[in-house]
Image (tube, rainbow, N blue to C red):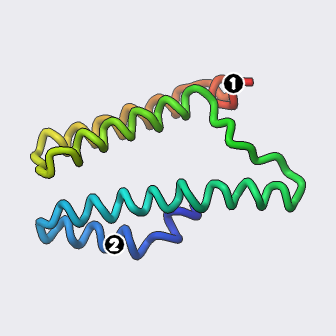
Amino acid sequence: LLPIVGNACEHAAAVRFAMQDKLGLSVSIAVGSSTQIALFVVPFSVLCGWAIGRPMDLNFGTLSTSMITLSVIVVLSMVVDGQSNWLQGYLLCSVYCIIAVMYWYLPDELNDNDS
């Protein structure tokens, strides 16, 4: 919830620029926002966990790590050539749906950390 609310202005700007057919700027805003969350919010959450005495380690488990890796590969394939078409948009939407279905139907004991 924190990344969505904290970066709502950036998300709105990315959508606005995408509607104005400025895809490069829109993708750079989205990737920059994700990088900001990865480099600031996640370590900050770990430090807050230490402060309140709750363990918030960075052990994401096998499924979460593989989904992050898949997401990075798909975004890299979109950004590398600097152009987009309907097939790449369809690929992004279908990967999003595949990840959502995997997490929806995965049993809770497998979705937790693989310790």
Give the amino acid type for the residue marked by disc 1 in the picture. Answer: Asp
The total of numbered circles placed on residues is: 2
Q: Is residue 42 left or right of residue 22?
A: right
**Residue denoted by label 1:** 114
- Asked whether 101 or 50 is in front, the reply is 50
Residue 19: horizontal and vertical position, in percent?
Answer: 16, 68
Q: Is residue 101 left or right of residue 64?
A: left
On residue 65, the disc is none
Which of the 4 image quadrants contains residue 109?
top right
Q: Is residue 85 left or right of residue 68?
A: left
Which of the 4 image quadrants contains residue 59?
top right
Q: Which residue ends up furthest to the right in the rendered image? A: 53
User: Quadrant where the C terminus lies?
Assistant: top right
**Residue denoted by label 2:** 12
Q: Is residue 40 above or below residue 12?
A: above
Residue 66: horizontal and vertical position, in percent?
Answer: 49, 29
Q: Secondary structure at mark 2?
A: helix
Q: Is residue 6 above or below residue 112?
A: below
